[in-house]
């Protein structure tokens, strides 16, 4: 595409890329268009040019795709929380399945694998049990707010504009969390305003209030509030806690994490329980889990139940197997499958996660799960296991080649691979293909209105020639 002074052009969107952007073609070059879907025709602004592709944003819709719907959220298109609200839900599911299939074929060279239709979420709004909101000295204004005298440009408590660290939209209502969360958020906002303590500056790194993190339980409707601050101030936190407790009996725990680090991460170097037990409880199936402020837990509880049941189905357990669970985290998968096998051995590098896993086993009376703390390769060496089934649930970057090699050497009859990244799933399945056949892949929608998709792949060991 030739460089021109005019950066706005008309284009038809004919495809969709992993990452959720529409694909248009101009002079033979692929252009990835934000906020566009196949079937759209519009005027697009070229925002970045590269040698073999360009990036753009839709500025005017000339003809709408039949797959478009009116997004119910006023922040849609500006907030990075959920970027696909304007896309029909059935089409979201179809595109997620297609992304998984394309990655298997193009990256992994795995053609013809059975990729099932994406399992839908239910509900598709108010599904998140955890939300993290950033404090900022100055709110980022929506176009409709520009130039309006009644809009105060001060305190923001909300979500970031995609790709920025210092632009925060002041969120009055997030549709991804249960409605009560929005009322709690508004009360926190008022409490911060009236506290007399300054909001943390995302550029200056001076100030007090940094994040508000809300957790909720589907099991009993209880809530946890975790206020992250730059320093300790018991008076400020106690006053906010009294305010929240007086208005919301559903709040059972209020916690203060303190961090002086400049990085925008809502985890403190120290933690104080301001009020309550310091945790909430959640249920998946018949099992109960204790969740503290910094515990990892799937952010969609109902989706997690569907995910873990899919893992159990793919594992094909009869009750006598030894199962090895790599990257076992807080032990949710081992505990969920514990009734269906003889023993589960989990390997996890994060000490706090192993402690959570062991505590959750005690909470549920599960005696056939044990955990090894350490690097996966080190843990495998210490385990000296001969598993019948290996479950692999790695981070987004996937498995190290050395770990793949160790799994191949153990040669269990079946592998179950849980993935949140279709690209690394495809790469790792190709490496495992030396010894294993991909029997089926089940995409699962854990995050409606985003392009993210979870997948569970079942691999069967090939017979040796």
Image (spheres, rainbow, N blue to C red):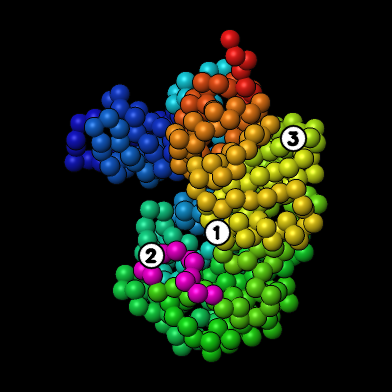
- State yes or no: residue 356 in magenta: no
Name the residue nearer the viewer: 294 or 334. 334
Residue contact at pointers 2 and 3, CB within 8 angstroms: no
The relative height of residue 261 versus residue 18 in the rendered view (above or below) is below
Q: Is residue 55 left or right of residue 97?
A: left
Number of marks present in the image shown: 3
Q: Which mark is residue 28?
A: none
- Vertical placement of residue 316 versus 299, above or below: above
In primary-sequence order, the first of circles 1 and 3 is: 3
- Give the residue displayed 51% in from the left and 81% down from the top: 192
Choose mark 1 or mark 2, whichever is in front: 1
Quarter residue 150 falls in: bottom left
- Tell me the magenta residue range: 261-271
Quarter of the C terminus within the rendering = top right
Q: Which mark is residue 263?
A: 2
Compared with 439, 246 (above or below) is below
First in residue order: circle 1 vs circle 2: 2
Q: Give the image location of residue 354, x and y in percent.
A: 60, 56
Q: Residue at x 37, y 57 (%)?
A: 164
Camera-nearest residue between 457 and 61: 457
Q: CA distance from mark 1 to mark 3?
A: 27 Å
Q: Report the residue marked by disc 3.
A: 321
Q: What secondary structure characterizes most of the magenta part? A: loop
Q: Which residue is mark 1?
A: 351
459 lies left or right of 41: right
């Amino acid at each position: 595409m030739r460089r021109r002074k005019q950066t706005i052009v008309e284009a038809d969107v004919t495809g969709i890329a992993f990452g959720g952007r529409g694909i248009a073609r101009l002079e033979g070059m692929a252009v990835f268009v934000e906020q566009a879907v196949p079937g759209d025709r519009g005027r697009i602004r070229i925002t970045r040019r590269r040698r073999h592709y360009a990036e753009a944003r839709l500025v005017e819709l000339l003809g709408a795709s039949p797959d478009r719907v009116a997004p119910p959220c006023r922040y849609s298109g500006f907030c990075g929380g959920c970027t696909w609200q304007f896309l029909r839900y059935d089409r979201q599911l179809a595109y997620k399945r297609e992304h998984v299939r394309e990655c298997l074929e193009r990256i992994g060279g795995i053609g013809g694998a059975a990729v099932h239709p994406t399992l839908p979420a239910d509900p598709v709004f108010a599904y998140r049990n955890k939300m993290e909101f950033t404090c900022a000295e100055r709110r980022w204004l929506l176009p409709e707010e520009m130039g309006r005298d009644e809009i105060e440009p001060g305190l923001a408590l909300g979500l970031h504009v995609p790709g920025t660290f210092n632009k925060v939209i002041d969120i009055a209502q997030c549709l991804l969390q249960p409605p009560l969360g929005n009322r709690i958020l508004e009360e926190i906002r008022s409490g911060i305003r009236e506290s007399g303590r300054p909001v943390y500056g995302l550029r200056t790194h001076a100030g007090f209030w940094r994040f508000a993190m809300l957790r909720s339980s589907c099991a009993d409707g209880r809530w946890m509030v975790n206020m992250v601050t730059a320093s300790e101030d018991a008076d400020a936190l106690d006053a906010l806690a009294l305010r929240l407790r007086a208005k919301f009996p559903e709040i059972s725990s209020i916690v203060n994490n303190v961090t002086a680090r400049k990085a925008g991460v809502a985890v403190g170097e120290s933690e104080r329980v301001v009020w309550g037990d310091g945790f909430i409880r959640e249920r998946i199936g018949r099992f109960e889990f204790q969740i503290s402020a910094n515990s990892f837990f799937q952010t969609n509880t109902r989706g997690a139940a569907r995910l873990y049941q899919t893992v159990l189905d793919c594992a094909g357990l009869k009750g006598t197997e030894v199962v090895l669970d790599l990257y076992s985290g807080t032990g949710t998968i081992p505990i969920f499958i514990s009734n269906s096998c003889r023993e589960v051995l989990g390997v996890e590098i994060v000490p706090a996660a192993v402690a959570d896993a062991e505590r959750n086993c005690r909470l549920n009376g599960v005696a056939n799960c044990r955990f090894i703390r350490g690097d996966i390769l080190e843990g495998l060496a210490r385990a000296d296991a001969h598993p019948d089934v290996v479950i692999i649930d790695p981070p987004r970057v996937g498995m190290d080649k050395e770990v793949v090699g160790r799994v191949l050497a153990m040669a269990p009859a079946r592998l179950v691979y849980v993935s949140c990244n279709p690209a690394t799933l495809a790469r790792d399945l190709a490496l495992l293909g030396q010894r294993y056949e991909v029997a089926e892949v089940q995409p699962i929608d854990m995050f409606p209105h985003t392009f993210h998709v979870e997948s569970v792949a079942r691999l069967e060991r090939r017979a040796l020639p």
